[in-house]
Image (cartoon, helix red, strand yellow):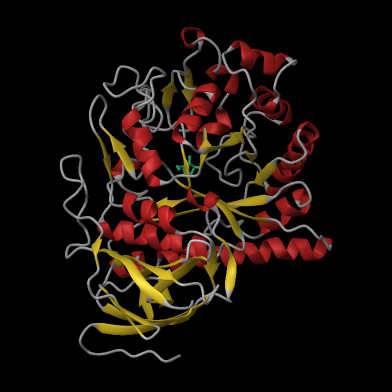
Amino acid sequence: MSTTESAAGRITAKITLDAAFTVGPVRRRTFGAFVEHLGRCVYTGIFEPGHPKADGDGFRTDVLELTRELGVSTVRYPGGNFVSGYRWEDGVGPVEERPARLDLAWHSTDPNHVGVDEFAKWSAKAGVEPMMAVNLGTRGTQEALDLLEYCNIDGGTAFSDQRRANGAENGYGIKMWCLGNEMDGFWQIGHKNAMEYGRLAADTARAMRMVEPDLELVACGSSAPTMATFGEWERVVLTETYELVDLISAHQYFEDFGDLQEHLSSGHRMEAFIKDIVAHIDHVKSVKKSAKQVNISFDEWNVWHMSRDESKTPAGKDWPVAPVLLEDRYTVADAVVVGDLLITLLRNTDRVHSASLAQLVNVIAPIMTEPGGRAWKQTTFHPFALTSEHAKGTVLQLAVESPRLSGGKTADFAALSAVATFDAAAGEAVVFAVNRSATDSITLSAAVAGLGNAKVIESVTYANKDPYWQATADDSTSVLPGQNVSVKLDGGRLTAELPAVSWSMIRLAVDGAGS
Ligand code: AHR
């Protein structure tokens, strides 16, 4: 490793891009998000009849616009912990006849004004692919089959005709289905041990495939790498389900406990989690001598300041409708971490086939709303939107030489986190890079001759003198990604200054010699 460190708070890192070395395709499903019946994500988030910007279906058009601008691909629904106590039938049919129910997961009341049909309609307007979760907490195989029939059978059966009577002539054709949510968690309604869940997931998957063989099914993996059962859970669940599912889920949240350098190691910790899950999947594959490849659905990831007051669920006799819950405000540093997490997911595109930022609106979200008022962007909106817009084609296998850092509990991680994508047809390559150092800027030196003749078309960096700056409804625009004027390209070598705690995107037009 040839890295240099100077005393002046400047370190050097090198990357090499070559069109011949690839990891796999850029998958649109990497840019998924999540809408749960939780807090104000649905009610006063995506749905607020009576809001001046609501459309005829009660959907906020300002939120729809921001969802499209964010570049979201799939949206997972309706939970999360919520799904493990959910009766989907409560949310269909005439709204005035729908029952209000206690939501035990979030100690709230759900009026059921939004259900499967509204979500399908909202998804079509937002231009996203719906990803549905079934309740394997209080319910089981039969109810999952009923919901599948309601959603995907065109007509001629009890549930599909009920959907048609409710206004949706054609089936929704939902392909991705989560078999429950976080069933390894003691907090989950209907929490099970690995064997109990594995058997139920296998039975449900088998039956769902009898209806539609080509569904893409996601078994629950661990809800965090810190779970005592992590690893053994994957082994047992996959032993029961391996030939019946396509993906196993991963969930991971990152929190800033006041040690910025530790917080900036989040991407490194996500990468370690992915590598461990891959090992557990491939162990089962090998033991089973299977030709099938199960991959990862990283269907909950984000920064979540879980121990702060924002995440305290209501208690006692109060069961509010759409309470303010998990409404974290994000800093520029949090946005850098989110950008790094997305880089990490892309870097592992060979095994991470789907991912969902948790969540989309108000609840640990890039989009915030005021009831009756404005919708605005958090800091985390920017790296997600720019990556989703510009990461196209193929993920390149980079050679990276970076100084190593340690922070808090995490030792020995690369200061530079980078990924590059290459779209041969469009003649464009993009480098996404995060400087994980809390103190030092990085001089990045990138060898790009392996792409052919290149020229810089855009270079953007998101950073701020105060990394703890947060956007608000009144000021969400004074700190935005800006042009990085240090970027230079000379004789196949690109150089750039990446400030401490920063996320950057450098777009290159390439003439195709490397494609
Ligand atoms: O995204 C918030 C919650 O985090 C989800 O409901 C649950 O699945 C996870 O623990």
Rendered-image quadrant of the N terminus: bottom left
Task: Indicate the position of residue 76 as horizontal and vertical percent values.
Answer: 53, 39
Give the vertical position of 318 relative to 346 (above or below). Answer: above
Given residues 440 and 39, the one toward you in this image is 440
Q: Nearer the viewer, residue 18 or 274?
A: 18
Query: Picture quarter containing residue 312?
Result: top left
Locate residue 453 relative to residue 305 in the image: left or right.
right
Instruction: Where is residue 274? Give x, y as percent.
Output: 56, 63
Furthest residue toward right: 289
Numbered circles on residues, count: 0
Residue shown at the point (20%, 86%) measured from the top left:
8
Horizontal side of residue 254 vs 334, given as left or right:
right
> Which image quadrant is residue 192 in?
top right
In the visual, does 189 lie left or right of 443?
A: right
The residue shown at (31%, 45%) is 328
Q: Is residue 265 above or below residue 112?
A: below
- Residue 239 percent coordinates (x, y): 77, 54
Q: The C terminus appears in which quarter of the rendering?
A: bottom right
230, above or below 212, in the image:
below
Specify whether residue 143 is in view: yes
Residue located 34% across and 39% down the image? 66
Where in the figure is residue 262, as x and y percent of width and height? 35, 68
Q: Nearer the viewer, residue 173 or 87?
A: 173
At 46% across and 59% down in the image, what residue appears? 391
Q: Is residue 402 visible?
A: no
Residue lying farthest to the top in this orientation: 97
- Where is 447 relative to 58, above or below? below
